[in-house]
Amino acid sequence: MLPIVARTIFRIQERLLGRGTFAIVRQLEESQWWPRERLDALRASRLAELVSSAYEHTPYWREVMDRHGIAAGQVRSLADLRRFPLLDKATLRSRRDEMTRRDLRRVQLVRTSGSTNEALQFHTSSIREAHINAARIRGHRWIGVNKGDKEVYFWGAPVELNAQDRLKRLRDRMVNDMLTSALIISPQTAPEYVARWAGWRVKCLFGFPSCMVLLAQMAASLGVDLSVLKRRGLKAVCATAEVLGANRGIIADAFGVPVYDSFGLREAGLIGHECEHGTMHATDEQLILETIDPVTGNSTEGEGELVVTNLVGLAMPLIRYRTGDAVTLSATPCPCGRSLGGLTISGGRMLDFVVTSQGRWVGGVAFIYTMRAIRGVVKFQVHQERIGQLRVLLAVDKEFSADGVEQVRNVVAKRLGCDDEILVELVDDIQPAPSGKYRPVVSKVAWQLRAGDAFPPKV
Ligand SMILES: [Zn+2]
């Protein structure tokens, strides 16, 4: 599909969904160049509107503000905002309905795994989704990728498709988005993916860095030439959802194109996207970002746990929401000249793989999607010490059913596609690594295999 045709179809789709996405993109394209004072004035007025709306329409926020003596009309600055208590995931989970506005149209409940794999459900509206889509479109334009250009989502997509999934795939294709499941990567599928993407002439590859690194390593060991993608039009790789770190260099070398990072949380919005100079810019028009000391909860300057206030999510106001991610915020000007603030991510999700006795590499992302379907799973971690066996640790809440362990064993077995042994253990809690990075999969096997001569293993 020609990019301009795909873009037009996307435009029509968004309009049918009641989203003014492109009007917001146009606003964002202007506001990114405004003087900082003007940007801050916009944020202050959006904050005032958010707080008034929250007080007026939601019992939870009314109670919080009354308890803390916060008058709705008097919240206009970051200092005012800091009078609100922090909002944690447990409260979001337990009091969700009391935080939701009931009078708005097109409000829907969505489910997320969250950045630290704590499953969450929250309410969103068409308008909020339009803001997020628009921010993403703007961020992609910074790196030379326009909406309508061909983009592969190397993503956690279902492998077995039902009718609704098929319809969605067709719709994606019409706007030049191609979904390729990163749930399972094997010596059979890796060359197929590369051939499919090259044949389609993909311009931007978007997805989990861990999966791209594995694909690159597998391609190298199988003698599959990745440079064909660049020759066929690949311009950029855009990473998301994980700490990029050293993987940036590995991916850039393998694909021969620049690698950019983006950072979003389903419940909080698109937090940041890298510009052409490699600065991750905050979506300042839509969010107020703060940092706190994760232990005391006190505000910090620059470095700390990221706390987000979403200025455009009126359907379910998120005010001072603790993300659990470690970041450093900065106001240092970027050579690109945009007045948006900058951030770097120092903690977050790191994905690894387990390897089945059939030679399939099943990534952390696959388990995130699998566990999402089980009620009552709050956190999980999969351990693999040797091929043929997995240990699944689960921290659960009261919604976890009596046959939950059996359910977990079944869905994991289905995902693995073989009868490797699966041990399920209930634990009180699962802590992130000392670095603050949350690892859904901890696998000795994957690292040993990758370091060995016989990679990928022939089994
Ligand atoms: Zn910049």
Image (spheres, helix red, strand yellow):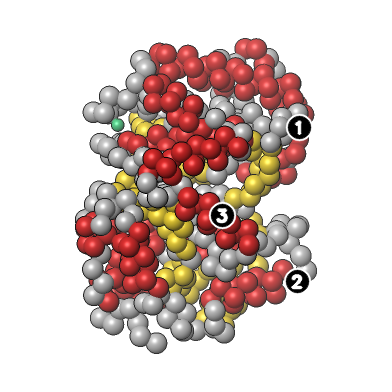
Residue 171, placed above or below residue 263: below
Nearer the observer, 171 or 213: 171
The residue beneath circle 1 is 102
Nearer the observer, 95 or 257: 257
Residue ID at (62%, 64%) = 162
Residue ID at (67%, 32%) = 315
- Determine the CA span between mark 1 and mark 2: 35 Å
Q: Which mark is residue 168?
A: 3
Whether residue 87 is visible, yes or no, is no
Amino acid type shown at disc 3: Lys
Amino acid type shown at disc 2: Asp
Q: Residue 190, percent across and down?
A: 36, 71
- Ligand 1 neighbours mark 1 (CB distance < 8 Å): no
SS for dot 3: helix
Which of the two labelled residues, at mark 1 and mark 2, occupies the earlier sequence position?
1
Q: Residue 126, percent across and down?
A: 61, 35
